[in-house]
Amino acid sequence: MELMTEMKNPKEFTESLNVAYLLMMVVYAGTVIVAYGIEGDSVQSFLPDSVPVGKVKTTIGVLIVFHI
């Protein structure tokens, strides 16, 4: 992989990948826990559908399109 070859120590790639996945899992789980805590059973399966129409929902849509 290109990313792996550009690292100072390519042997640490697996460890950095595991840390990145763990961090993403914590962020996603935190988001789901907060959303469920606020909305309860009325939260939609696609979380942005639970956000009321407006600037926030538009911003969320744009961020999802660009995967930020």
Image (tube, rainbow, N blue to C red):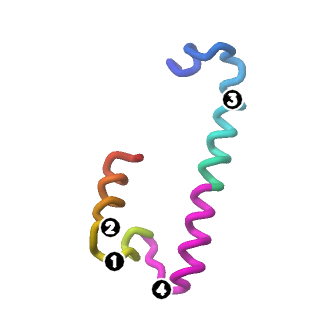
x, y percent for residue 49: 37, 73
Q: Amino acid at mark 4?
A: Ser
State the residue lying farthest toward the bottom.
41
Give me the C-alpha separation between circle 3 and circle 1.
Answer: 40 Å
Q: Is residue 42 left or right of residue 4?
A: left
Which labelled disc corresponds to residue 57?
2
Q: Amino acid at mark 1?
A: Pro
Q: Is residue 28 left or right of residue 55?
A: right
x, y percent for residue 58: 28, 63
Circle 1 SS class: loop
Image: 8 above or below 63 = above
Which labelled disc corresponds to residue 42?
4
Whether pointer 3 and pointer 4 mark residues with C-beta atoms closer than 8 Å, the reply is no
Give me the C-alpha separation between circle 2 and circle 4.
Answer: 17 Å
Residue extent of the magenta highlight: 27-46
Graded by Cα atoms within 10 Å as few (under 14), some (14 to 19) or many (20 or more), the crowding at tag 2 reads: some
Q: Amino acid at mark 2?
A: Lys
x, y percent for residue 27: 60, 56
Whether pointer 1 and pointer 2 mark residues with C-beta atoms closer than 8 Å, the reply is yes
Which labelled disc corresponds to residue 15?
none
Disc nearest the viewer among 3 and 4:
4
Q: Which residue has dot 1 on it?
A: 52
